[in-house]
Amino acid sequence: MSATDIGIDLGTANVIITLGNKGIVVNEPSVVAYDKKKHEVLAVGNEAYKMIGRTPEYIVAVKPLRDGVISDNEMTEAMIIAFIRKVMGKIFKPRIILCVPSSVTDVENRAVVEAALSAGARKVYLIEEPIAALIGAGVDISKPNGNMVVDIGGGTADIAVVSFNGIVKSSSIKMAGNKFDAAIVRGVTQKYKILIGEKTAENAKKEIANVFKPVGKKMMVKGRHLIKGLPESVEITDYDMYEFLHDNIMEIVDKVKEVFEQTPPELVGDILTSGIVLTGGGALLPGFAQQISESVGVPCRVADDPITCVARGVQKAFGYTDQLLDGFENISLYRYK
C-alpha cells in the first residue's frame, strides 16, 4: 500500500477517510458551508456542521448526500477536494477507493468517480458497502461460505449475502439513521404536541433508545409547543422510543427476511452457523441485534467499532487490488488518461 493511497467512506451522515497505513485520519459530518454571494466554499465537516441553522440566508450549510447517494454533485466534489487537501496538504495524484451502497446506479457511480477525479485522483476504484463492511469486520470473504452483513448508515441500510469474493444476494433500503431521527421528531410531535429538532432527536436516540426491551430510561427534551407556540420541555422514556422506532426497525428486519428468501439454502445454513454481522452507526442502537436475532432466528452480532468498520474495510481493500481486478465483480476500476 502506498503512503498516498486514500480510502473514502462517503456516507450520508459522515465522511471517513483513511490514508496509507495511518488508518483513519478524517471522521467528520458530510456537510458543506457555501457562500452564495461569493460563490465559494467556506467550510466542510465539523466547522460546517456547527453552522447549520445559525447563518445568514446567503450562507447555506448543505448536506450533499441524501439516502446514500449524491444529491448535489458540485458540493460533493467541493467536499471531497477539501477533505483530501486537509489530509494531504497537496495532491500527489493518489489512488482512491470510494465506497458506494450496493444499490447505486451507473449514473450515481459516474458522479462519485468524477468528483474523485476532480480532486486529483490517479485511479479511482469503487467498492460496495457490504463487501467493505465484511472485510473491515475481519470476515474472510474469499472462501465459498455464506456471510451476511446488515450495514445501517445514515441514509441507507444495505443487506447482503457474500460468498467467494462476491455478493450472492443483496438489497438496499432507504431506512436508516436519518429516518430514525425523523420518526422520533414525528412521534414526540404527535404524542406530546411538542416540536423538537433533529439534533435533539438524535441525542435522545443515542441516550435512551432501546428497540428490543425498554427498561424505563428517561430523558428531558426541549422544543416548541405546537398549540402555545412557546418553549417547553417534556420527559420521554425508552418505551416512547420503542414505540416511535418499531415500524422503522421492522422494515429493515423484513428486508433481511426477504434477502434470506432469495438466498441458496446451502448459504443459509452457513449463516445460521456464522451469524449475521451488524455494522454502521445504526448497529449501536441498543437492542437492534437482539431484535434481528429474535425475529429471524439467526444469531446476530455487532462488529467491533461498527461506525468505522466500512472505512477500515476500504483501507484493507488496497491490499486486494490485484485479486479484485481479476474479475472481482464488486469493485469497478475506472481508467482515465
Image (cartoon, helix red, strand yellow):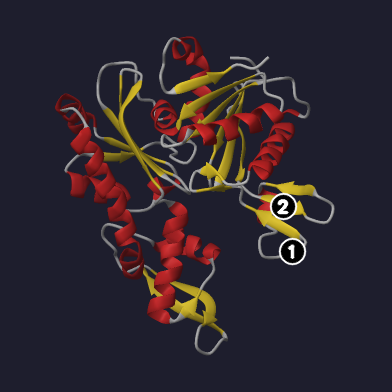
Q: Is residue 269 above or below residue 300?
A: above
> Which of the two residues, 212 or 246, is positioned nearer the viewer here?
246
Around disc 2, counting alpha carbons within 10 Å, would you say few (fewer than 14), some (14 to 19), or many (20 or more)? many
**Residue type at tag 1:** Thr
> Which of the two residues, 282 or 76, is positioned nearer the viewer here?
76
Q: Is residue 74 above or below residue 228?
A: above
Looking at the rendered structure, the number of numbered marks drawn on it comes to: 2
User: Secondary structure beneath disc 1?
Assistant: loop
Which residue sits furthest bottom? 228
**Label at residue 17:** none
User: What residue lies at 72% left-to-right and 38% top-to-bottom?
Assistant: 82
For residue 95, which quarter of the picture? top right
Q: Where is residue 64 drawn, in percent x and y?
A: 61, 47
| Quarter that holds the C terminus | top right
Q: Is 70 on the left-hand or right-hand side of 234?
A: right
**Residue type at tag 2:** Ala
- Earlier in the chain: of badge 2 and badge 1, it is 2
User: Secondary structure beneath disc 2?
Assistant: strand
Q: Where is residue 3 drawn, in percent x and y?
A: 65, 18
Q: Where is residue 203 drawn, in percent x and y?
A: 50, 61
**Label at residue 55:** 1
User: What residue lies at 33% left-to-right and 38% top-to-bottom?
Assistant: 171
Q: Is residue 329 above or below residue 244?
A: above
Q: CA distance from mark 2 to mark 1?
A: 9 Å
Q: Are marks 2 and 1 in contact (CB under 8 Å)?
A: yes
| Quarter that holds the N terminus | top right
User: What residue lies at 42% left-to-right and 66% top-to-bottom?
Assistant: 184
**Label at residue 33:** 2
Q: Is 292 on the left-hand or right-hand side of 334?
A: left
Around disc 1, counting alpha carbons within 10 Å, would you say few (fewer than 14), some (14 to 19), or many (20 or more)? few
